Amino acid sequence: MYIPAMTEDRTTALLVRITTNPEIFGGKPIIRGKRIAVEHVLADLAAGQTPETILENFPFLEADDIQACLLFASREVSQNHPAQASRANTG
């Protein structure tokens, strides 16, 4: 598993931005307690939106929020055995 160099302090500073609240989106991971789920930011990025466009569309977000979403997703994928997912997609 490849993880680019990032200090532990920086990693922690980013990941504390991702929270959960059972009252918001059924407890899905959200950004800084706001009503925007990590999955929404990831879906926008996957659809081709740039971080700058996302920040324009959601002015309460910060660039570090987007990086936190990417780091969170990276950690989730690495913990959930991506090899199993790729085997399922081979036909």
Image (spheres, helix red, strand yellow):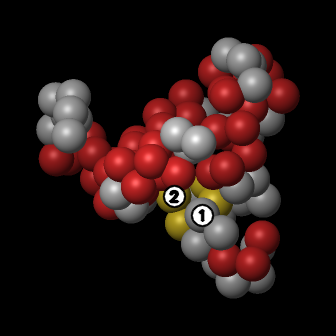
The N terminus sits in image quarter: top left
Which numbered tag is attached to residue 29?
1
Tag 1: amino acid: Pro
Q: Report which residue position mark 2 lands on.
A: 18
User: x, y (%) of residue 72?
Assistant: 44, 50
Residue 42 screen position, x and y as percent: 64, 39
Q: Residue at x 16, y 29 (%)?
A: 5
Q: Dot 1: within a 10 Å radius of its alpha carbon, few (fewer than 14), some, or many (20 or more) residues?
A: many
As drawn, 83 above or below 3: below
* In the rendered image, the vertical position of residue 20 relative to residue 37, given as above or below: below
Pick the front one: 42 or 20: 42
Report the side of 76 relative to 49 (left or right): left
Q: CA distance from mark 1 to mark 2?
A: 6 Å
Residues marked 1 and 2 touching at CB (< 8 Å): yes
Q: Hey, which quadrant is residue 91 in on the image?
A: top right
Q: Which residue is at the far front?
A: 91
Rendering coords of residue 31 (x, y %): 61, 54
